[in-house]
């Protein structure tokens, strides 16, 4: 996406919704920053489409959860998937980028007719969609980032991905930023995705030490 297009879209949104400026200022005093869902929808609309990328993505809210739906390719079978996604844990440090996710109201619907194994499972109702974590738990060769899965909850630790864990620059940035400011919560209201931060002034000493160690 070009910077000019992003700025133009942002200015257009603020012009049509001037109350957003006041709302953003009030939230900023509590270290709470909102991203309009309309902005996320616009961003998704600018994404290039590939054969394997999700299509017809819809973004909504079921506060405090984010509601997503998309048409995906599940082992050659076109499926319309939707879920309410709630972030109930955020633990960021130099050694862990851990995010706990609860998946609720999960639905899978076939797009067109198919007799594939995936289609057969969906048609039979054999999948317990109320506990998607249990399904993820037994996926063969599941992604390294998935460290826990049980019931309706899945925990992802991005530091388990070698490309991220071995990124020295990222680790240096985390060592400086995380002691001072961290994420407290991620949640929604009907029109926004909010990221709430927590500040730790006492962490300045640790951050300064991290900077000094690099000089």
Image: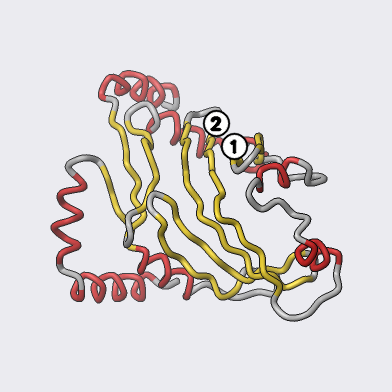
Mark 2 surroundings within 10 Å by alpha-carbon count, few (fewer than 14), some (14 through 19), many (20 or more): some
Q: Residue 156 appears at what percent x and percent y?
A: 60, 40
The image quarter in which residue 81 lies: bottom right
Near-viewer residue (203 or 102): 102
In the picture shown, does residue 66 fall above or below 60?
above
The correct choice, above or below, for 42 with respect to 36 in the image is: below
Q: In this view, does 110 lie above or below 68?
A: below
Q: Where is residue 133 in the image (x, y as percent from the top left)?
A: 66, 43
Query: Can you name the residue that lies furthest to the bottom here?
Result: 112
User: Dot 1: within a 10 Å radius of its alpha carbon, few (fewer than 14), some, or many (20 or more) residues?
Assistant: many
Q: Which residue is pictured at 66% across the width and 40% down the height? A: 146
199 on left or right of 79: left
Q: In which quarter of the image is residue 32?
A: top left
Judging by the rendered image, the residue that carries numbered circle 2 is 96
Q: Mark 1 points at which residue?
A: 157
Label number found at residue 123? none
Residue name at image x 62 percent, y 69 percent? 54
Question: Is residue 125 left or right of 45 when viewed as pictured?
Answer: right
Callout 2 secondary element: loop
> Residue 114 at what x, y percent from top left?
81, 76
**Residue sitting at 49 percent across and 70 percent down?**
58
Residue at (56% x, 75% y) in the render: 56
Locate the N terminus by quadrant.
Answer: bottom left
Please tell me whether mark 1 sits on a helix, a strand or a loop. strand
Q: Along the horizontal axis of the image, is 8 left or right of 45? A: left
Contact flag, marks 2 and 1 (Cβ < 8 Å): yes
């Amino acid at each position: 996406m070009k910077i000019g297009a992003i700025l133009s879209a942002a200015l257009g949104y603020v012009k049509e919704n001037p109350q957003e400026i006041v709302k953003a200022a009030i939230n900023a005093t509590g270290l709470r920053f909102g991203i309009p869902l309309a902005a996320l929808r616009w961003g998704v609309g600018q994404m290039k489409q590939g054969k394997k990328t999700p299509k017809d993505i819809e973004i909504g809210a079921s506060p405090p959860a984010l509601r997503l739906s998309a048409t995906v390719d599940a082992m050659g079978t076109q499926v319309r998937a939707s879920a309410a996604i709630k972030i109930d844990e955020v633990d960021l440090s130099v050694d862990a980028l851990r995010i706990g996710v609860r998946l609720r109201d999960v639905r899978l619907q076939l797009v067109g007719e198919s007799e594939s194994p995936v289609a057969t499972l969906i048609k039979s109702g054999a999948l317990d969609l109320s506990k998607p974590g249990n399904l993820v738990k037994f996926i063969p060769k599941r992604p390294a980032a998935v460290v826990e899965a049980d019931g309706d909850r899945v925990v992802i630790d991005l530091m388990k991905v070698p490309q991220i864990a071995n990124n020295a620059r990222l680790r240096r940035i985390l060592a400086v930023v995380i002691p001072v400011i961290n994420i407290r919560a991620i949640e929604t209201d009907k029109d926004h995705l909010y990221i709430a931060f927590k500040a730790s002034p006492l962490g300045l000493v640790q951050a300064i030490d991290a900077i000094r160690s690099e000089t």
